[in-house]
Amino acid sequence: MKWTQPRSLQARQLLAASLGLIAFLALAGYALDRAFLKTAEQNMRERLRSYALSYANDIDFMRNGELYYEPATLPDPRFERPGSGLYAVVALPNGRWNSPSAEGPKLPATAMLKAGEERFERRLRATEIDGRASEAYRYGLGLIWSIDGQPVGEFPYTIYILENADTLSKQVGVFRSALWRNLGGAGLILLLLQTVVLRWSLLPLRRVIDELKRVQRGRAQRMSERHPRELEPLTDSINAFIESERANLEQQRNTLADLAHSLKTPLAVLRSRLDANAGDDELRADVASQTQRMNELVSYQLARAASGGHTLFAAPIAIEPIAEQIVRGLEKVYASRGVLCEFEVAEGVQFHGTPGDLQELLGNLLENAFKWASSRVLLTVAVGEAAPNRRPGLLMAIDDDGAGIPADKVALILQRGVRGDERVHGHGIGLAIVQDIVRAYRGTLEVLQSEELGGARFEVRLPPGL
């Protein structure tokens, strides 16, 4: 059966977090187990060492070298019980001495250690008194005994203390049982808590989904603004997309309405001339005139429809190459007047939209400036307004050294709904297309007095993008 990843984001996060938690608990349990085993072995070593020192204090030797051991109190009663699991062995140069508990079990062979040498050995093989194979821990301590402090009578001996490994294994078993039981319980609680926290943390996403469904069903106009910072780019993009689509639809409706309204007058004129039984020459002239007017109106409205919207997530476009191409053509058209255009384009500034929109913006504004300039036109492109987590805005300004535009005419040339033939007066119908494009990009178009050249200054500001 082929395993597939869960499609649910919550299930994916819960699975990943659960696997991570299980791995962490397993590593933590292993580390604690190793630490406890090491500590238990270290404690056993210290205990066996204390037994060895106790024997060293109570052991004495006769003049003939025989070992004499009669302590007042045994370090542990198990040393007197055969097969108890705790044994004492004294290795001598010519033999060895065993505690009563060591009589019967088969213990590992002993070797003499140097004076002062200590040795702790783990898991040595042994055979218990009942013939059962076992393992034992052994501690050895090398000593020297002398007769009346005379070097001639010195001889070495070694005390070994052994303890059956079952004692330590039982301790480790009890610890491991408690450890994994507690870690399992803690893991289960953490998994439940993790599930609750995960559902709580994904609640904003579920709210976004619910709001999006309401928008799809027409119960809401847009996404709300109350969302966590991490989701704001998503909801802002959705709202921008919704607004862009509505703006495009509204633009199409306006274009069709304006086109229909614009064609009423020429059609009415033609109808009235037909009803008036005008002569052929007069009728032919009227038909040619009104047909030309309708052609201009259709071309204008189609241009508006083509530039009325923009691509929301368009790739960035370099501005300077397109501007240079437009300016080269305009300088040829107005070569007789000697109009020249200067550029002040900031490095790296780009236009985020469609190439057609950029060409319409620059083409209409630059042609307007060339038409009314005396000799100089200035194109300025710079970074606009900045906003956190968004790309910066854009500033495009075109100055000319012409007569400028009176303040009382600014509102007229930018007014929406003024027909094409009305806009030809002053600055032409291109400004209407510019105004529509700028509005589609949620920007602003201002007509000012140029401080640098003295003529008009058309300033386009586009807001920070998503």
Image: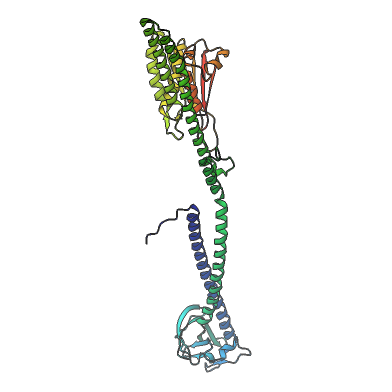
Task: Point out the residue furthest to the right here.
Answer: 72
Task: Point out the residue furthest to the bottom here.
Answer: 64
Please, is residue 37 above or below residue 451 in the view? Answer: below
Please, is residue 175 above or below residue 349 in the view? Answer: below
Whether residue 152 is visible to the viewer of this picture, yes or no, is no
Please, is residue 104 above or below residue 329 in the view? Answer: below
The location of residue 256, given as percent across then percent down, is 46, 24
Quarter of the N terminus within the rendering? bottom left
Please, is residue 166 above or below residue 289 in the view? Answer: below
The location of residue 67, given as percent across then percent down, is 54, 92
Front residue (pair 323, 2): 2
Q: In this view, does 22 lie to the left or right of 54?
A: left
The location of residue 265, given as percent across then percent down, is 46, 14
Front residue (pair 31, 179): 179
Way the structure is coloured: rainbow
At 40% from the left edge and 9% from the top edge, which residue is drawn?
Answer: 286
At 50% from the left edge and 54% from the top edge, which residue is drawn?
Answer: 10
Whether residue 106 is visible to the viewer of this picture, yes or no, is yes
Front residue (pair 93, 455): 455
Corner quadrant of residue 294: top left
Number of numbered discs visible in the structure rendering: 0
The location of residue 76, given as percent across then percent down, is 59, 86
At 40% from the left edge and 24% from the top edge, which residue is drawn?
Answer: 322
